[in-house]
């Protein structure tokens, strides 16, 4: 086999992390998840459930269950990263083929671009809320964009400024974000607790907040909302459940990544979501209407200094989250397309451009669009990928890979011209059942166009895709087996 470093599939960004470079312990992973969970979309996640009709405990239970479910594929996929030191795009080569891995990598990258756009819009809107206090003319700037864009000039300017700030951090490199993450780790929890105390005080105690009733009149109505909401909660971290090897490749041990994720993910998401639930419920009492967007809520405060401090905190913390969660992984995914020509910086720029083109301000305009169109929609794409990768690694290969062969265009993972047609077929089979429901959700087809049970499958999009693709892939690959020897693992057709 050709030398690893001269392979067209190799680059320093995609290379296995040597054992000496694997320094992350349990608390590093716990801190990573706490840091990524403490962000405005997490708050909006809980708030959107309240706006959708749930009471406080129904919303919190839904979020906890969703994060517990997604923790399972997170840990399972993280195993390969910790064992072999490889990132997600390289890990995907084992199941999809050395060239076919670009399919799940790009699917995952496009979703990350969407999240990058959403986070950038949130940071830009926080900047707008800050600047309009001191420059009121920002609110009355003449319209530049067509009405169909749904974008006012003032917020658009601030969005672009914040976008440029993100691109500058990409230019400086990933190391430049560490100080921002430290700032966020201390400041954002303090800001969140301050907002919680405001809610309790303004609503005259927790009692009135927690007594806000559910808007569902019966059990049927509740479950009609609950199941797609649960799928949305799983979908919230569906991207990270795939590319978690991008982080676990630095783990000191399997125990470090497993314990760190258990400690960091469900508890922090549930706790921060609880704050979102309490504050959103309080707005119904204080203002007479539910305000699910914390940036709009903060803009209602009378003190310019208070609003300014809050918006500065949001801008900096959003910047830190955006780089850590939405730049690192898609940059690797785009680099996987052409390792010799696309590095981390170029991948980051590509992410930034696509993130603008998806019109993120429309995705977060209302709770229904945020959950049913965005979160559930992309979970129908990523669930099948997760099912295939986990089935391949655990049931076909028995957790055994040959690292060097993952970088060999003509090696054992090349399948047929670099593509594993079984994986691609299984991916399509997992996506197919969810297409009618998605088309119904975005109002392209009418309710009577097909049986109701088919469109209802979309409410379980991630689960349907995960199990359909995982099971069909395992069935199609049953004619293959893994042969283990003391020195290497060879993948061949069975007799």
Image: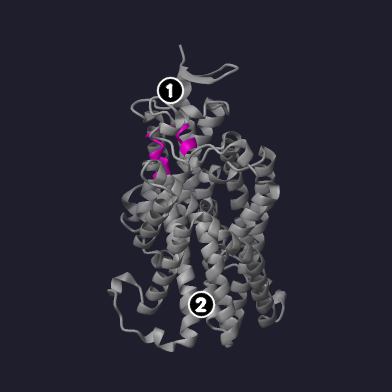
Give the Cα separation between the discs numbered 2 and 1: 59 Å
Residue 454, given in percent of the width and then of the height, sits at 40, 45
Picture quadrant of residue 479: top left
Above or below, 88 against 198 in this view is above
What range is drawn magenta here?
A: 90-107
Mark 2 falls on what kind of element? helix
Above or below, 107 against 321 in this view is above
* Residue furthest top in the image: 495
Q: In the rendered image, which residue does mark 1 sit on?
A: 1
Above or below, 109 against 308 in this view is above
| Viewer-side residue, 418 vs 270 | 418
Left or right of residue 8, residue 480 in this image: right
Magenta-drawn stretch contains 301: no
The N terminus - image quarter: top left
Which mark identifies residue 296?
2
The C terminus - image quarter: top left
């Amino acid at each position: 086999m050709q030398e690893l470093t001269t392979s067209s599939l190799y680059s320093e960004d995609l290379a296995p992390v040597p054992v000496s470079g694997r320094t992350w312990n349990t608390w590093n992973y716990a801190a990573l998840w706490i840091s990524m969970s403490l962000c405005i979309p997490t708050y909006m996640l809980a708030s959107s459930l309240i706006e959708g009709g749930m009471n406080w405990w129904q919303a919190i239970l839904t979020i906890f269950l969703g994060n517990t479910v997604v923790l399972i594929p997170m840990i399972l996929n993280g195993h390969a990263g910790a064992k072999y030191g490889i990132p997600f795009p390289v890990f995907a080569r084992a199941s999809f083929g050395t060239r076919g891995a670009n399919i799940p990598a790009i699917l995952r990258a496009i979703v990350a671009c969407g999240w990058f756009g959403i986070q950038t819009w949130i940071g830009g809107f926080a900047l707008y809320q800050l600047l309009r206090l001191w420059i009121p003319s920002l609110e009355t700037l003449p319209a530049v964009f067509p009405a169909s864009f749904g974008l006012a000039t003032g917020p658009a300017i601030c969005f672009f400024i914040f976008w440029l700030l993100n691109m500058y951090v990409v230019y400086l490199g990933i190391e430049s974000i560490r100080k921002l993450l430290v700032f966020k780790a201390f400041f954002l929890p303090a800001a969140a607790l301050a907002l919680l105390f405001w809610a309790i005080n303004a609503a005259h105690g927790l009692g009135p907040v927690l007594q806000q009733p559910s808007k569902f009149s019966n059990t049927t109505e509740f479950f009609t909302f609950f199941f797609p909401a649960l799928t949305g909660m799983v979908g919230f971290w569906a991207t990270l459940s795939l590319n978690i090897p991008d982080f676990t490749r630095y783990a000191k041990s399997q125990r470090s990544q497993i314990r760190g994720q258990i400690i960091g993910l469900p508890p922090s998401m549930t706790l921060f979501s609880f704050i979102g639930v309490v504050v959103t419920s309080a707005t119904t009492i204080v203002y007479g209407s539910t305000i699910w967007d914390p940036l709009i809520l903060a803009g209602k405060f009378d003190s310019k200094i208070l609003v300014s401090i809050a918006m500065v905190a949001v801008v900096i913390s959003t910047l830190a989250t955006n780089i850590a969660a939405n730049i690192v992984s898609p940059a690797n995914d785009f680099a996987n397309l052409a390792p010799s020509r696309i590095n981390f910086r170029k991948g980051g720029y590509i992410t930034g451009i696509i993130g603008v083109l998806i019109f993120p301000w429309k995705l977060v305009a209302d709770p229904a669009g945020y959950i049913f169109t965005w979160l559930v929609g992309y979970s129908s794409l990523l669930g099948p990928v997760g099912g295939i990768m986990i089935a391949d690694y655990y049931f076909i290969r028995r957790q055994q890979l040959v690292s060097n062969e993952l970088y060999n265009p003509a090696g054992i993972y090349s399948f047929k011209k670099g593509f594993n047609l079984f994986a691609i077929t299984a991916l399509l089979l997992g996506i197919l059942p969810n297409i009618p429901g998605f088309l119904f959700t975005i109002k392209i087809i009418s309710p009577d166009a097909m049986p109701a049970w088919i469109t209802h499958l979309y409410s379980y999009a991630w689960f349907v895709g995960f199990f359909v693709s995982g099971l069909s892939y395992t069935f199609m690959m049953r004619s293959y087996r893994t042969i283990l020897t003391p020195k290497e693992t060879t993948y061949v057709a069975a007799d």
